[in-house]
Amino acid sequence: MYMLTGALLLMGITGTLLGVIIALFARIFKVDTDPRVELVRELLPGANCGGCGKAGCAAFAKSVVAGENLPSRCPVSSQEQINAIALALGISAGSGVRKRAVVRCGGDMFQTKERLNYNGVCDCNAAAVVAGGPKGCRYGCLGMGSCANVCPFGAIEIVNNLALVHRELCVGCGKCADVCPRHVIALVPADAEIHVYCNSPEKGAEKRKQCKVGCIGCRKCARYSSDQFTISGTLASVNYEAETLPGEEDVEKIQCPTGALLSAREHHRIETHDPNWKKDEK
Amino acid sequence: MKYLELTVGAALVYNFVLTRFLGICPFLGVSKRISTALGMSGAVVFVMTVASFCTSLIYNYLLKFSWNGKVIDLSFLQVLIFILVIAALVQVIEIVMQKLTPGLYQALGIYLPLITTNCAVLGSAALNFNAGRSVIDATIFGCFSGIGFAIALLIFASLRERLELASPPKAFEGIPIGLVTAGILAMAFVGFSGLC
């Protein structure tokens, strides 16, 4: 009997005492957290992609509540979600231009020559330090999929040894652009349809030797519209800040001689259905 | 001589992980990278020391007492009360650390609450009880047991980081080659036996 009472007493008292101690410590050492941070974090998509420039959704929520960032910095949330956050905090949502990644290279395994046979680690950053990578062009996509590996949304696929962005999946967080050793991936406005699929500043003849689809700097596009296209050296690029971005009908009219200037839809079709595609000379 | 046993003995000869096979779960779970292994080791050394101190107080002064001239021996409650105390202790440490050292709290992260279920901590308390150690001895033993755990975990983590780069047969990749390595490591630690 003594034993039983003693055991019950000991466990009962210890349990209660420890409970009280924990409660006391929780009260004394209470860390005040802003309930709004938790609220914003729940409204965020929770992808932790880092596209906003913060370490994750929790860190972004903190910065939004602190007023360092506007909710529209989140590239993943839809406009309704962003408005919901702004409404909950009573601040303005801000208007951010939606971005999307584009791989500015059309040089897949059928278009660009291989300079050497690389069979090392299948990683762009590793391949780039071995004599500048296997491809003939030192500025193009290496096609080893480092960008596809870091993409939190699975939006990049490697087709024909070339990174291909699936536009419907890409949110424009920019992780791929950070990891690419060639800086061939650019973040462009999401409604841009036309891109120059070349990134090489080399001379046109030099490019032509290695790659069938490089931009040779013929200025055809710039003559068509000097507002929509800019030429630097021998490389044309779309001016994404132009008032009206070029559309597919403009590509038809310009008739880029190498096929570096393409609509994203056409580029996608070529890589997935027609890899042996050749720009017919007109 | 007694202190040699409590220090070198606890850390190397009777290493918690590799000789007594306690705390295998974090040994395999958090040994993928040295940085996480370091965080876990720090948390274990800290909690084991404090837990050994607290549990030794309990079994020395609470579990056996006389009441109305009768000796009441409640030592059969040891496991129950040790778990209770360790869980509460970890909870309290977590609360205090979150307030006072947010940096350390962030660094240890999930490993701190995980230690509640680490059998090495309960094991050190039970071993202290069985050996009937005094409060000071038990604390030293707990501290050095934690250091022994940290040594084993860090060695294993650095081995596994290198194993990532090795190319074992397909069937051995990952955990299997890790377990083989752990076995060889345990055999190496047998070499310490007879030291004290």
Image (cartoon, coloured by chain):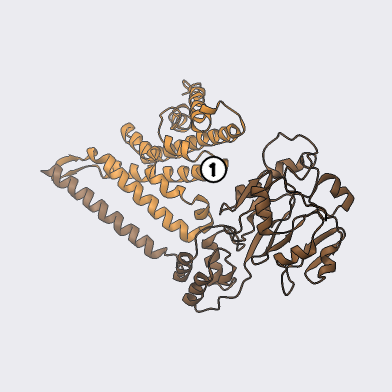
Estimate the x, y position of residue A95 in percent, counting from the top left.
60, 74
B124 left or right, relative to B65: right
A36 left or right, relative to A55: left
Residue found farthest to the front: A282
Q: Is residue B50 visible?
A: no
Residue at coordinates 39% horizontally, 64% vertically from top-left?
Answer: A28
Residue at coordinates 58% horizontally, 64% vertically from top-left?
Answer: A75
**Chain A pictured colour:** brown
Estimate the x, y position of residue A169 in percent, counting from the top left.
57, 57
- Of residues A280 and B97, which is closer to you in this image? A280
Residue position marked by numbered label 1 in the rendering: B38
Q: Residue A66 lies in what quarter of the image? A: bottom right
- Of residues A203 and B77, which is closer to you in this image? A203
Q: Amino acid at mark 1?
A: Leu
For mark 1, give the secondary structure. helix
Label the orange chain with its letter.
Answer: B
A104 left or right, relative to B41: right
Estimate the x, y position of residue B72 in percent, counting from the top left.
18, 41
Estimate the x, y position of residue B1 in percent, counting from the top left.
45, 27
Q: Residue B118 lies in what quarter of the image? A: top left
